[in-house]
Image: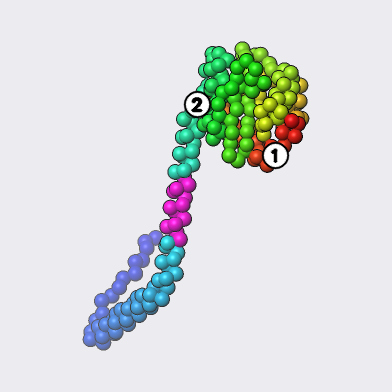
Amino acid sequence: MRRKWLRVRRPRGVPEVLSAAVVALAVLFLAFQMAAAAVRALKDAWPLLLALFLLAGALGAWQIARTVQRRRSDAERLALRITLAEFDVMDDLQFERALRDLLVHDGWPAHRVGDGGDQAADVIGDHTQRGRIVVQAKHTRVGRRVGSSVMYAVKGTAGPAHRADHAVVVTNGTFTRDARAWGDRHGVHWVDRDRLRRWAENGTALREFLALSARSRRARFRRAA
């Protein structure tokens, strides 16, 4: 079935021409009136439109700045990256220095103190908000486990000897079940091989996965002094 197209017939004769002209003028007049009304509306509403435009621009700039800052933070976190394989071939001194560098990277101005008579502290860092952290480094061969005796020693000296707010034992190996349980009960944090990977390889800050509190809870160790 063939479609029937609508054809517009040209006006014939003077009456039809005049009628078409009147209709065209009416359409033009209506269009002019609508344009004038739109201009008046924009003129009256320009302060609101300007405010909305500025607000949208500010939100866009804030979003861009936030994205740039997040990418910069991610890049900085990945700037210091140490793999587990690199930890495994370190000696004790290199391991302690690497942990010190990781603390400094996390915002803890830290220094190495581990030597004879270190009183269960190899690295000490001081944070303006989270206080003092004491780190005991236990570099082992892969597969070796750190026992509860290390936790006892760190707990006993963190407050009296070092006036610490936080105590952490870090190893490239693992901990015994008793050592982990005892540390959790008595506030001695532990970082095993898996957590060390998160910290050193993935760039997760130590305070994040250990949930290190602010300085207000410093009495955990200092009351024991």
Residue placed most toward the observer, 103 or 43: 103
Q: Amino acid at mark 2?
A: Arg
| Residue sticking out furthest to the left | 14
| Number of residues whose C-alpha sits closer than 10 Å to that of mark 1, classed few (under 14), some (14–19) or many (20 or more) | some
**Residue that protrudes farthest toward the bottom in the picture:** 15
Please check the rendered image and state whether residue 64 is part of the magenta-colored stretch, yes or no.
yes
Q: Residue at x 44, y 66 (%)?
A: 51
Where does the image place residue 161, in percent across and percent down from the top left?
Answer: 68, 26
In the picture, the disc for residue 217 is 1
* Residue 135 position (above or below residue 66): above
Name the image quarter holding residue 36.
bottom left
The answer to whether one can see residue 83 in this image is yes
Q: Quadrant of residue 216?
A: top right
Label 1: state its secondary structure: helix
What is the number of the mark on residue 81?
A: 2
On the rendered structure, is 98 left or right of 35?
right
- Residue at left 49%, top 28%? 80
Residue located at (44% from left, 57% from top): 58
Q: Is residue 109 magenta?
A: no
Between 18 and 75, the one lying in front of the other is: 75
Residue range (magenta) = 55-67
Where residue 110 sits in the image (x, y, percent)?
55, 29
Rendering coords of residue 42 (x, y %): 39, 73
Left or right: 29 with respect to 53? Answer: left
Secondary structure category for the residue under label 2: loop
User: In front: mark 1 or mark 2?
Assistant: 1
Q: Earlier in the sequence, mark 1 or mark 2?
A: 2
